[in-house]
Image (spheres, rainbow, N blue to C red):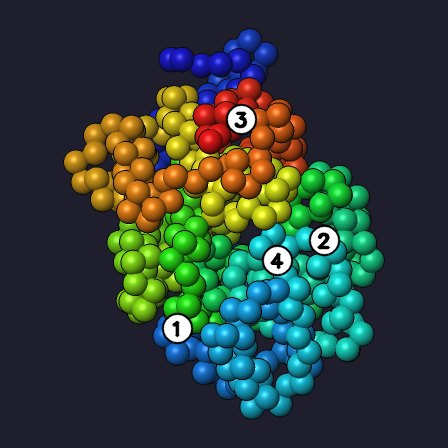
Amino acid sequence: MNVRKDRIFISKYKAQSLCVYYLCGQTWSVIKMDRFNFSFGATTKLYFGTGKLSILHTLHLPGKRALVVISNGRSARVSGALDRTLNELRQAGVWTVIYDKVGANPTKEMVEEGASLFCENECDFIVALGGGSVLDAAKVMAFNANNQGDLWDYVLSGTGRKKPATADPFPWIAIPTTAGTGSEVDALGVISNLKTKEKLGIFGGFAVYAIVDPELMVSVPPRYTAFQGFDALFHSLEGYIGNMSNAWSDAIQEQAIRHVAMYLPRAYRDGNDMEARAGMAYASTMSGYSMVVTSCTAEHSIEHALSAYHEALPHGAGLIMICKAYFSTIIGQGVAGERFVKMARMLGCEDASRPEDFLAALEELMRVCEVNDLKMSDYGITPEEFDEMADNAMTVMVRCWSKDLCPLTHDEIVSILKASYR
């Protein structure tokens, strides 16, 4: 068996367990990991389906004064989603104030400003209407509003000061307008600290309700439909080959992967294809649940380093740029070979027999969605940053970095970045 010192190494998947080899002193030991051993604590009540936004006013809402969080763009206003949401809240007798400054990669300053606006207006819950960045920002605002002060006091990784929370987050409601992050059903919000060049997950709490209405996603342009769809795909692909994989996560992730393969090309070609929009919304939400029961892996750690240094880089685009080099590296480690064959078949390569067939299937999906030509250099990324980015990936997002079957070294991460650079 090809093993490397001081590295966890998973030799193969079995039907009910994983064989894990690890170095203890100079002796290789084996642990059997039970695939029927997992936990799941999501508390969000999910309402899913076309037209579901219209039920918002009928729900037992958690307050009477809402901070409505939207992006700094015009999409929520132009599409009519904001007016529809405000009308629903008015029908329920809820007073509202709007925070509309959330960018593609929400920052510490945005969260603190939104939390201050919440407190100044004596709000008692938050409604997040937008893509994953809006949902992430809103859930962390809900935390910061009830645990006031510098947000980084409460951050548990990176340069965070690890102060314990003194109160539960305020309640919040998730209304996604994109299909990508699955942030409506998980409890972590990814926030950037531009001063320290960190982008990491912060606990914000589960939404009280998630209303996933594919009608709200029709106006997303093709390019961003693809970026967001690949984000959803990678959540499940990573979880499927990660070291937290289990029987339940398999079921969730396999559903998500197959739905992306089936519906993303259609949603990309025709944004008004409601079946495709619903299929992608479903894949995104399932991939959100994937992150609740398992985790993303180092692919996400590496991308978070890229977009922490370059705020304008869309998260999905960054993942697409590095995906082939990342998965090629994992295949080269000799781990999870059968899993890659299964994923290739889920992506449409029915006669797949080798892990490398997965790379071909992934490349084909990228080609169909016209995202196989993305360049890091277009976003100002330079190779001179790669060493520092590798350190960032291994320390700031250590939770994801540690979830690969065979954790990547600094040199491997640099090699992935170099191979991905154009």
Residue at (80%, 74%) from the top-left corner? Answer: 120
Q: Is residue 89 visible?
A: yes
Question: Secondary structure under badge 4?
Answer: loop
Mark closer to the chain start, 3 or 1: 1
Check disc 4: other Cα within 10 Å, few if <14, some if 14-19, many if 20+.
Answer: some
Mark closer to the chain start, 4 or 3: 4
Residue 215, percent from left and from top: 39, 73
Taking 354 as reference, is 409 left or right? right
Taking 241 as reference, is 385 left or right? right
Question: Secondary structure under badge 2?
Answer: helix
Amino acid carrying label 3: it is Ile
Mark closer to the chain start, 4 or 2: 4
In the image, residue 9 sits, relative to residue 277, either above or below, namely: above
Disc number at residue 215? Answer: 1
In the picture of the structure, the residue carrying the numbered disc 3 is: 413
In the image, residue 292 sits, relative to residue 275, either above or below, namely: above
Check disc 1: other Cα within 10 Å, few if <14, some if 14-19, many if 20+.
Answer: some
Quote the CA–CA distance across marks 3 and 2. 26 Å
Quote the CA–CA distance across marks 4 and 2. 11 Å
Mark closer to the chain start, 3 or 2: 2
Quote the CA–CA distance across marks 3 and 1. 39 Å
Residue 158, percent from left and from top: 71, 38
In the picture of the structure, the residue carrying the numbered disc 4 is: 103
Question: Secondary structure under badge 3?
Answer: helix
Disc number at residue 108? Answer: 2
How many marks do you count on the picture? 4
Amino acid carrying label 1: it is Glu
Amino acid carrying label 4: it is Gly
Check disc 3: other Cα within 10 Å, few if <14, some if 14-19, many if 20+.
Answer: many
